[in-house]
Amino acid sequence: MPKIIFKHGTSTTEVEALNGETLLEAANRNGVKIFGGCGGAGVCGTCHVVIDPAYTSKLKPASDSEADVLDVLPNAAPLSRLACQVVISDELDGVTVAVP
Ligand code: FES
């Protein structure tokens, strides 16, 4: 099972994720609070996270609709993603995900 390290403020939480679940699902299933206002539909932007740059090449690029949501977030960064749209696979083992 891939390990995902969620970084929130100055603390980190390492969780065991399941292949096929999203970052949002892995976080919430393991007690890491990431608010998902639209229930994972990818339209609200409340699940915004920033991905470790070493792993961005291992992710599928953001869809046009995800990119549209990220474009209007005031604190979005080049490595921003929506946690509800990133599906976990073994390739993400060890990734750090910052929760703004
Ligand atoms: S939960 Fe709304 S965009 Fe991810």
Image: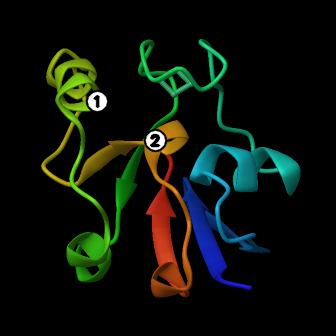
- Percent across and percent down for residue 78 are 12, 49
Decide: is 63 above or below 80. Answer: above
Q: Is residue 80 left or right of residue 82?
A: left
Residue at image coords 64%, 62%: 20
Which image quarter is the C terminus in? top left
At label 1, counting other C-alpha atoms closer than 10 Å, the crowd grade (few under 14, some 14-19, many 20 or more) is some
Check residue 56 in the rendering and tell me which mark sits there, or answer none. none
Instruction: Say what secondary structure mark 2 lies in.
Output: helix
Query: Can you tell which quarter of the image residue 70 is in?
Result: top left
Which image quarter is the N terminus in? bottom right
Q: CA distance from mark 1 to mark 2?
A: 8 Å
- Percent across and percent down for residue 41 are 53, 20
Q: Are marks 1 and 2 in contact (CB under 8 Å)?
A: yes
- Percent across and percent down for residue 69 are 27, 19
Instruction: Say what secondary structure mark 1 lies in.
Output: helix
Residue at image coords 19%, 15%: 72
Residue identifier under label 1: 66
Decide: is 72 above or below 88. Answer: above
Residue identifier under label 2: 85
In the depicted view, which residue is nearer to us: 1 or 31?
A: 1
Question: Within 8 Å: ligand 1 and the Cβ of disc 1?
Answer: no
Amino acid beneath label 2: Gln
